[in-house]
Amino acid sequence: MPASGGTTGGASFPFHLQLLTSIGWAAIWWIVTLGLLIFKALHLPFPPAALPMEVVASFLVLLVNAFGVLIGMRGNKMESTSAIVISAVLLSIAAVGAIYYMWLQTYVLMMDLAFSATYLGINGVAILLGFWATQSVARLARVPGFKLEVESVRGEKKKN
């Protein structure tokens, strides 16, 4: 059993990799979205009040995703179910932001749709893996390691 009192083998490597993918794609998504917003402001009749709101909203989506990823990584490493659930909630909020940029913004280009759909898919997989990691950690936390060892020793004694 680890010195911290956590379970053995509860952390999820696929969840961790998906969180890294999520934050990497979020940065790419934000740069592309910002570039597309500048393009739309220069070449399309963009409402003046909508542009600052959409730039700030895209930055907030990036921040929420970053906090969700950081909390998720910490929760995964520390095997904390509450931190992983908070991460899933924050990633869900970022997914709603991706849906906004996919369908509801002032002008939606095909590039917006493609990048936001990919962002939504990556966050969706991260949310599912987060719930899988939560279930795995919660299951292992219910059965202490010493009980498993005692039961295996008892089983070996009965065989002899």
Image (spheres, rainbow, N blue to C red):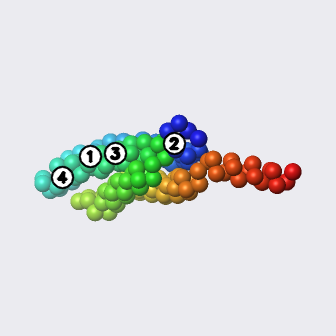
**Residues at marks 3 and 2, CA–CA distance in whole angstroms:** 26 Å
Residue highlighted by disc 3: 67
> Pointer 1: residues within 10 angstroms few (<14), some, or many (20+)?
some
Q: Position of residue 8 (x, y in %)?
A: 59, 44
Q: First in sequence: mark 1 or mark 3? A: 1
Q: First in sequence: mark 3 or mark 2? A: 2
**Residues at marks 1 and 3, CA–CA distance in whole angstroms:** 12 Å
> Pointer 2: residues within 10 angstroms few (<14), some, or many (20+)?
few
**Residues at marks 1 and 2, CA–CA distance in whole angstroms:** 38 Å
Residue at the right extreme, as displayed: 160
Q: Residue at x 44, y 46 (%)?
A: 75
Q: Residue at x 26, y 59 (%)?
A: 105
Residue highlighted by disc 2: 5
Q: Which amino acid does label 4 sit on?
A: Met
Residue 160 or residue 102, whichever sits in front: 160
Q: Is mark 1 on a helix, strand or loop?
A: helix
In the rendered view of the protein, which quadrant contains the N terminus? Answer: top right
